[in-house]
Image (cartoon, rainbow, N blue to C red):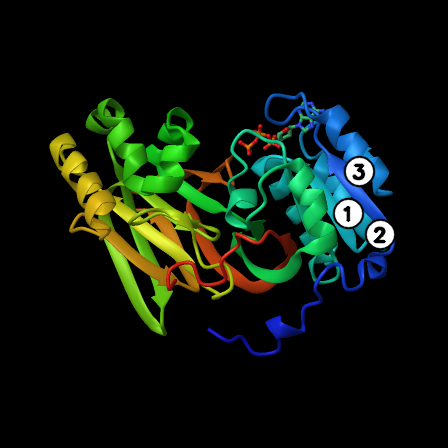
Amino acid sequence: MQQQGFSIEDEPVAGAMPQADGERWLVLNPTSGTADHTEVVRELATERGYRIEETTGEGHATELARDAAANDVHLLAVAGGDGTLHEVVVGLAEAEALDTTTVAVVPVGTENIFATNIGIRDAEHAFEVVETGARRRVDIGVADGEPFVMSCIAGLLADASVATSSEQKERFGSLAFVASGLKQAASFDGLHIDLTAISDGETVSWSGDALAALVGNSRRFVEEGGQAELEDGLLEVVVIERMPAGDIVAEAFAQRVLGRTTDHVFHTQASQLSIRGADGDPIDFSLDGEPRRHDELRLHTRPFALRVCVGPAYDVEPTRS
Ligand SMILES: Nc1ncnc2c1ncn2[C@@H]1O[C@H](COP(=O)(O)OP(=O)(O)OP(=O)(O)O)[C@@H](O)[C@H]1O
Protein backbone atom coordinates (compact mmCIF):
# COMPACT_ATOMS: atom_id res chain seq x y z
CA MET A 1 0.00 0.00 0.00
CA GLN A 2 1.42 3.41 -0.91
CA GLN A 3 1.08 5.84 1.97
CA GLN A 4 0.55 9.51 1.31
CA GLY A 5 3.29 11.93 2.23
CA PHE A 6 6.17 9.45 2.19
CA SER A 7 8.26 8.20 -0.62
CA ILE A 8 10.26 5.12 0.22
CA GLU A 9 12.38 5.58 -2.86
CA ASP A 10 13.64 8.86 -1.41
CA GLU A 11 15.33 7.12 1.48
CA PRO A 12 19.09 7.55 1.32
CA VAL A 13 21.23 4.46 0.93
CA ALA A 14 23.91 4.32 3.58
CA GLY A 15 27.35 4.35 2.10
CA ALA A 16 26.31 7.06 -0.30
CA MET A 17 26.51 9.63 2.48
CA PRO A 18 27.41 8.06 5.81
CA GLN A 19 29.02 11.28 7.02
CA ALA A 20 25.60 12.92 6.94
CA ASP A 21 24.74 10.98 10.09
CA GLY A 22 26.79 13.34 12.26
CA GLU A 23 27.50 12.06 15.75
CA ARG A 24 26.67 8.38 16.27
CA TRP A 25 25.65 6.92 19.59
CA LEU A 26 25.37 3.33 20.73
CA VAL A 27 23.02 2.28 23.52
CA LEU A 28 24.53 -0.94 24.85
CA ASN A 29 22.73 -3.32 27.21
CA PRO A 30 25.52 -5.39 28.81
CA THR A 31 23.05 -7.93 30.23
CA SER A 32 21.17 -8.93 27.07
CA GLY A 33 21.40 -12.51 25.83
CA THR A 34 24.34 -14.40 27.28
CA ALA A 35 25.92 -11.12 28.46
CA ASP A 36 29.27 -11.89 26.83
CA HIS A 37 29.08 -9.38 23.99
CA THR A 38 30.14 -6.15 25.69
CA GLU A 39 33.84 -6.27 24.76
CA VAL A 40 33.27 -7.19 21.11
CA VAL A 41 30.51 -4.64 20.61
CA ARG A 42 32.55 -1.91 22.32
CA GLU A 43 35.44 -2.66 19.96
CA LEU A 44 33.26 -2.60 16.84
CA ALA A 45 31.64 0.66 17.91
CA THR A 46 34.85 2.36 19.02
CA GLU A 47 36.57 1.58 15.70
CA ARG A 48 33.70 3.36 13.97
CA GLY A 49 33.61 6.38 16.23
CA TYR A 50 30.42 5.75 18.19
CA ARG A 51 29.85 7.31 21.57
CA ILE A 52 28.91 4.37 23.80
CA GLU A 53 26.29 4.55 26.55
CA GLU A 54 25.71 1.45 28.68
CA THR A 55 22.34 0.77 30.26
CA THR A 56 22.19 0.22 34.01
CA GLY A 57 18.70 -1.20 34.41
CA GLU A 58 15.07 -1.18 33.39
CA GLY A 59 13.95 1.92 31.49
CA HIS A 60 17.48 3.30 31.12
CA ALA A 61 17.56 2.67 27.36
CA THR A 62 14.46 4.88 27.06
CA GLU A 63 16.24 7.67 28.95
CA LEU A 64 19.36 7.30 26.81
CA ALA A 65 17.31 7.46 23.61
CA ARG A 66 15.73 10.69 24.85
CA ASP A 67 19.23 12.04 25.63
CA ALA A 68 20.42 11.10 22.15
CA ALA A 69 17.48 12.96 20.64
CA ALA A 70 18.19 16.00 22.80
CA ASN A 71 21.78 15.93 21.51
CA ASP A 72 20.63 15.89 17.89
CA VAL A 73 21.93 12.39 17.27
CA HIS A 74 20.60 11.09 13.96
CA LEU A 75 22.20 7.63 13.99
CA LEU A 76 21.46 5.59 17.09
CA ALA A 77 22.69 2.00 17.32
CA VAL A 78 21.05 -0.30 19.87
CA ALA A 79 22.96 -3.34 21.12
CA GLY A 80 20.59 -5.59 23.01
CA GLY A 81 17.60 -7.79 22.41
CA ASP A 82 14.03 -6.96 21.47
CA GLY A 83 13.38 -5.53 24.95
CA THR A 84 16.16 -2.96 24.67
CA LEU A 85 15.06 -1.99 21.18
CA HIS A 86 11.53 -1.55 22.51
CA GLU A 87 12.77 0.82 25.23
CA VAL A 88 14.77 2.86 22.71
CA VAL A 89 11.82 3.23 20.34
CA VAL A 90 9.67 4.38 23.28
CA GLY A 91 12.30 7.02 24.13
CA LEU A 92 12.55 8.27 20.56
CA ALA A 93 8.76 8.45 20.31
CA GLU A 94 8.55 10.40 23.58
CA ALA A 95 11.17 12.83 22.26
CA GLU A 96 9.30 13.04 18.93
CA ALA A 97 12.57 12.08 17.27
CA LEU A 98 11.52 8.96 15.37
CA ASP A 99 11.39 10.92 12.17
CA THR A 100 14.92 12.30 12.46
CA THR A 101 16.73 9.27 13.87
CA THR A 102 17.94 6.18 12.04
CA VAL A 103 18.11 3.15 14.31
CA ALA A 104 20.77 0.48 13.77
CA VAL A 105 19.78 -2.75 15.53
CA VAL A 106 22.78 -4.68 16.90
CA PRO A 107 21.39 -8.10 17.87
CA VAL A 108 22.99 -9.42 21.07
CA GLY A 109 19.81 -10.47 22.90
CA THR A 110 18.26 -13.87 23.38
CA GLU A 111 15.67 -13.82 20.60
CA ASN A 112 16.46 -10.78 18.40
CA ILE A 113 13.28 -11.33 16.43
CA PHE A 114 13.10 -7.80 15.04
CA ALA A 115 16.75 -7.88 13.90
CA THR A 116 16.16 -11.21 12.15
CA ASN A 117 13.09 -9.77 10.45
CA ILE A 118 15.07 -6.87 9.01
CA GLY A 119 17.91 -9.07 7.81
CA ILE A 120 20.54 -8.35 10.48
CA ARG A 121 22.55 -11.48 11.30
CA ASP A 122 24.86 -10.51 14.13
CA ALA A 123 26.68 -7.61 15.76
CA GLU A 124 29.42 -7.32 13.17
CA HIS A 125 26.92 -7.49 10.33
CA ALA A 126 24.87 -4.75 12.01
CA PHE A 127 27.77 -2.29 12.01
CA GLU A 128 28.62 -3.23 8.43
CA VAL A 129 25.05 -2.60 7.32
CA VAL A 130 25.13 0.95 8.71
CA GLU A 131 27.89 1.71 6.19
CA THR A 132 26.79 -0.31 3.20
CA GLY A 133 23.17 -1.33 3.61
CA ALA A 134 19.87 0.29 2.74
CA ARG A 135 17.78 2.34 5.10
CA ARG A 136 14.04 2.00 5.17
CA ARG A 137 11.13 3.58 6.92
CA VAL A 138 9.10 0.79 8.50
CA ASP A 139 5.80 0.72 10.37
CA ILE A 140 5.49 0.53 14.11
CA GLY A 141 2.48 -0.48 16.15
CA VAL A 142 1.04 1.58 18.99
CA ALA A 143 -0.77 -0.05 21.94
CA ASP A 144 -2.59 2.45 24.14
CA GLY A 145 -0.01 5.09 23.26
CA GLU A 146 3.02 2.82 23.70
CA PRO A 147 4.94 2.01 20.53
CA PHE A 148 5.98 -1.54 19.71
CA VAL A 149 8.06 -2.94 16.88
CA MET A 150 7.45 -6.64 17.00
CA SER A 151 4.23 -7.90 18.48
CA CYS A 152 1.56 -7.71 21.10
CA ILE A 153 0.46 -11.11 22.38
CA ALA A 154 -2.21 -12.20 24.83
CA GLY A 155 -3.14 -15.63 26.11
CA LEU A 156 -1.36 -18.93 26.09
CA LEU A 157 1.40 -17.96 23.72
CA ALA A 158 2.65 -15.14 25.88
CA ASP A 159 3.89 -17.86 28.26
CA ALA A 160 4.44 -20.73 25.86
CA SER A 161 6.75 -18.59 23.71
CA VAL A 162 9.38 -18.95 26.41
CA ALA A 163 9.41 -22.73 26.03
CA THR A 164 9.67 -22.86 22.24
CA SER A 165 12.88 -22.60 20.29
CA SER A 166 13.19 -19.44 18.25
CA GLU A 167 13.96 -21.45 15.13
CA GLN A 168 10.68 -23.29 15.49
CA LYS A 169 8.82 -20.03 16.07
CA GLU A 170 10.31 -18.42 13.02
CA ARG A 171 9.46 -21.35 10.79
CA PHE A 172 6.11 -22.53 11.99
CA GLY A 173 4.29 -19.44 13.16
CA SER A 174 1.77 -19.30 15.93
CA LEU A 175 0.46 -22.81 16.25
CA ALA A 176 3.95 -24.11 16.82
CA PHE A 177 3.84 -22.42 20.20
CA VAL A 178 0.60 -24.08 21.03
CA ALA A 179 1.56 -27.48 19.69
CA SER A 180 4.74 -27.37 21.76
CA GLY A 181 2.77 -26.44 24.86
CA LEU A 182 -0.06 -28.94 24.48
CA LYS A 183 -0.21 -29.70 28.19
CA GLN A 184 -0.63 -26.02 28.97
CA ALA A 185 -3.15 -25.69 26.15
CA ALA A 186 -5.27 -28.49 27.58
CA SER A 187 -5.45 -26.82 30.99
CA PHE A 188 -5.64 -23.23 29.76
CA ASP A 189 -8.93 -21.58 30.63
CA GLY A 190 -9.03 -19.45 27.55
CA LEU A 191 -9.24 -15.72 27.05
CA HIS A 192 -12.77 -14.41 26.84
CA ILE A 193 -12.36 -11.56 24.41
CA ASP A 194 -14.14 -9.19 22.08
CA LEU A 195 -11.93 -8.07 19.25
CA THR A 196 -12.89 -5.43 16.71
CA ALA A 197 -10.63 -4.50 13.81
CA ILE A 198 -10.73 -2.10 10.91
CA SER A 199 -9.62 -4.09 7.91
CA ASP A 200 -9.67 -2.63 4.41
CA GLY A 201 -12.19 -0.01 5.49
CA GLU A 202 -14.54 -2.68 6.92
CA THR A 203 -15.16 -3.41 10.57
CA VAL A 204 -14.63 -7.06 11.44
CA SER A 205 -15.04 -8.60 14.84
CA TRP A 206 -14.36 -11.78 16.76
CA SER A 207 -15.84 -12.74 20.11
CA GLY A 208 -15.39 -15.90 22.08
CA ASP A 209 -12.91 -18.06 23.95
CA ALA A 210 -9.41 -17.87 22.54
CA LEU A 211 -6.19 -19.67 23.26
CA ALA A 212 -4.35 -16.60 22.13
CA ALA A 213 -4.67 -13.27 20.40
CA LEU A 214 -1.62 -12.19 18.43
CA VAL A 215 -0.95 -8.87 16.82
CA GLY A 216 2.21 -8.67 14.76
CA ASN A 217 3.95 -5.66 13.32
CA SER A 218 7.19 -7.26 12.14
CA ARG A 219 6.12 -10.81 12.98
CA ARG A 220 3.84 -13.00 11.00
CA PHE A 221 1.86 -15.55 12.98
CA VAL A 222 0.07 -17.61 10.36
CA GLU A 223 1.12 -20.23 7.89
CA GLU A 224 4.90 -20.50 8.02
CA GLY A 225 5.41 -17.45 10.24
CA GLY A 226 8.53 -15.33 9.79
CA GLN A 227 8.72 -11.72 8.70
CA ALA A 228 5.51 -9.75 8.23
CA GLU A 229 5.22 -6.95 5.73
CA LEU A 230 6.65 -3.92 7.49
CA GLU A 231 5.76 -1.21 5.02
CA ASP A 232 2.04 -1.77 4.49
CA GLY A 233 0.56 0.24 7.36
CA LEU A 234 -1.12 -2.90 8.67
CA LEU A 235 -0.92 -5.18 11.67
CA GLU A 236 -1.29 -8.94 11.32
CA VAL A 237 -4.09 -10.04 13.62
CA VAL A 238 -4.56 -13.68 14.55
CA VAL A 239 -6.91 -15.22 17.08
CA ILE A 240 -6.57 -18.91 17.86
CA GLU A 241 -9.84 -20.30 19.08
CA ARG A 242 -9.90 -22.48 22.15
CA MET A 243 -10.02 -26.08 20.92
CA PRO A 244 -9.27 -29.64 22.04
CA ALA A 245 -5.59 -30.59 22.14
CA GLY A 246 -5.97 -33.12 19.28
CA ASP A 247 -7.28 -30.40 16.99
CA ILE A 248 -4.29 -28.19 17.73
CA VAL A 249 -1.93 -30.81 16.34
CA ALA A 250 -4.06 -31.19 13.20
CA GLU A 251 -4.26 -27.42 12.71
CA ALA A 252 -0.55 -26.92 13.24
CA PHE A 253 0.08 -29.64 10.67
CA ALA A 254 -2.28 -28.06 8.13
CA GLN A 255 -0.65 -24.67 8.60
CA ARG A 256 2.86 -25.96 8.38
CA VAL A 257 2.55 -28.60 5.71
CA LEU A 258 -0.23 -27.15 3.61
CA GLY A 259 0.75 -23.56 4.32
CA ARG A 260 -2.80 -22.43 4.90
CA THR A 261 -4.89 -20.93 7.65
CA THR A 262 -7.55 -23.14 9.16
CA ASP A 263 -11.05 -23.04 10.65
CA HIS A 264 -10.07 -22.40 14.23
CA VAL A 265 -7.77 -19.55 13.33
CA PHE A 266 -9.17 -16.09 12.66
CA HIS A 267 -6.77 -14.01 10.60
CA THR A 268 -7.01 -10.48 9.33
CA GLN A 269 -4.88 -7.45 8.68
CA ALA A 270 -5.88 -4.22 10.32
CA SER A 271 -4.83 -0.60 10.59
CA GLN A 272 -6.52 -0.37 13.99
CA LEU A 273 -8.20 -2.69 16.44
CA SER A 274 -9.31 -3.10 20.00
CA ILE A 275 -9.21 -6.11 22.30
CA ARG A 276 -11.14 -6.24 25.54
CA GLY A 277 -12.02 -8.83 28.10
CA ALA A 278 -15.59 -9.99 27.47
CA ASP A 279 -16.23 -10.54 31.18
CA GLY A 280 -14.69 -7.23 32.25
CA ASP A 281 -11.45 -8.79 33.55
CA PRO A 282 -8.15 -7.18 32.59
CA ILE A 283 -6.00 -9.00 30.05
CA ASP A 284 -2.27 -9.67 30.34
CA PHE A 285 -0.34 -8.79 27.21
CA SER A 286 3.24 -9.27 26.15
CA LEU A 287 4.26 -6.13 24.28
CA ASP A 288 7.56 -6.82 22.48
CA GLY A 289 8.12 -9.35 25.26
CA GLU A 290 7.38 -6.88 28.09
CA PRO A 291 4.40 -7.63 30.37
CA ARG A 292 1.46 -5.20 30.28
CA ARG A 293 -2.09 -5.38 31.69
CA HIS A 294 -5.09 -3.63 30.14
CA ASP A 295 -8.88 -3.73 30.51
CA GLU A 296 -9.21 -2.72 26.91
CA LEU A 297 -6.33 -2.32 24.52
CA ARG A 298 -6.56 -0.10 21.48
CA LEU A 299 -3.94 -0.65 18.83
CA HIS A 300 -3.09 1.11 15.61
CA THR A 301 -0.17 1.48 13.24
CA ARG A 302 2.08 4.42 12.57
CA PRO A 303 3.04 3.72 8.96
CA PHE A 304 6.69 4.34 8.05
CA ALA A 305 7.40 5.84 11.49
CA LEU A 306 10.72 4.10 12.22
CA ARG A 307 13.88 4.53 10.17
CA VAL A 308 16.10 1.45 10.32
CA CYS A 309 19.24 0.10 8.65
CA VAL A 310 18.24 -3.17 6.96
CA GLY A 311 20.31 -6.12 5.81
CA PRO A 312 20.20 -7.59 2.30
CA ALA A 313 17.85 -10.39 3.44
CA TYR A 314 15.16 -7.87 4.42
CA ASP A 315 12.14 -8.40 2.21
CA VAL A 316 9.88 -5.43 1.43
CA GLU A 317 7.04 -7.75 0.37
CA PRO A 318 7.67 -11.07 2.16
CA THR A 319 4.20 -12.47 1.62
CA ARG A 320 4.10 -11.75 -2.10
CA SER A 321 7.47 -13.14 -3.10
N1 LIG B 1 22.57 -3.01 33.37
C1 LIG B 1 21.47 -3.75 33.44
N2 LIG B 1 21.31 -4.68 34.42
C2 LIG B 1 20.22 -5.47 34.47
N3 LIG B 1 19.18 -5.39 33.58
C3 LIG B 1 19.28 -4.49 32.59
C4 LIG B 1 20.43 -3.63 32.47
N4 LIG B 1 20.23 -2.83 31.39
C5 LIG B 1 19.02 -3.18 30.87
N5 LIG B 1 18.46 -4.17 31.58
C6 LIG B 1 17.19 -4.87 31.31
O1 LIG B 1 17.35 -5.70 30.18
C7 LIG B 1 16.05 -5.94 29.62
C8 LIG B 1 16.11 -6.05 28.12
O2 LIG B 1 16.80 -7.18 27.76
P1 LIG B 1 16.89 -7.52 26.21
O3 LIG B 1 15.55 -7.65 25.63
O4 LIG B 1 17.80 -6.57 25.55
O5 LIG B 1 17.64 -8.89 26.19
P2 LIG B 1 17.07 -10.36 26.04
O6 LIG B 1 15.86 -10.51 26.90
O7 LIG B 1 18.23 -11.26 26.28
O8 LIG B 1 16.70 -10.45 24.49
P3 LIG B 1 15.31 -10.67 23.70
O9 LIG B 1 14.34 -9.64 24.20
O10 LIG B 1 15.67 -10.47 22.26
O11 LIG B 1 14.88 -12.08 23.98
C9 LIG B 1 15.19 -4.75 29.99
O12 LIG B 1 14.04 -5.26 30.66
C10 LIG B 1 16.05 -3.95 30.95
O13 LIG B 1 15.32 -3.64 32.10
The answer to whether mark 2 is within 8 Å of ligand 1 is no
Tags 1 and 2 touching, CB below 8 Å: yes
Foreground: disc 2 or disc 3: 3
The amino acid type, in three-letter code, at marker 1 is Arg
Does residue 256 sit above or below 244 in this rendering?
below
Of labels 2 and 3, earlier in sequence is: 3
Mark 2 vs mark 3, CA separation in Å: 21 Å
How many C-alpha atoms fall within 10 Å of the one at disc 3: few (<14), some, or many (≥20)? many
- Observer able to see residue 199: yes
Residue 77: % across, % down? 73, 44
- Observer able to see residue 102: no
How many C-alpha atoms fall within 10 Å of the one at disc 1: few (<14), some, or many (≥20)? many
Tags 1 and 3 touching, CB below 8 Å: no
Q: Residue 70 carries which label?
A: 2
Q: Is mark 3 on a helix, strand or loop?
A: helix
Q: Is mark 1 on a helix, strand or loop?
A: helix
Nearer the observer, 273 or 129: 129
Residue 271 located left or right of residue 136: left
Residue located at (80% from left, 58% from top): 18
Foreground: disc 1 or disc 3: 3
Residue 126: quarter of image? top right
Q: Which mark is residue 256?
A: none
The amino acid type, in three-letter code, at marker 2 is Ala
Residue 288: % across, % down? 51, 41
In the picture, which quadrant includes the C terminus?
Answer: bottom left
Label 3 sits on residue: 45
The amino acid type, in three-letter code, at marker 3 is Ala
Label 1 sits on residue: 66
Of labels 1 and 3, earlier in sequence is: 3
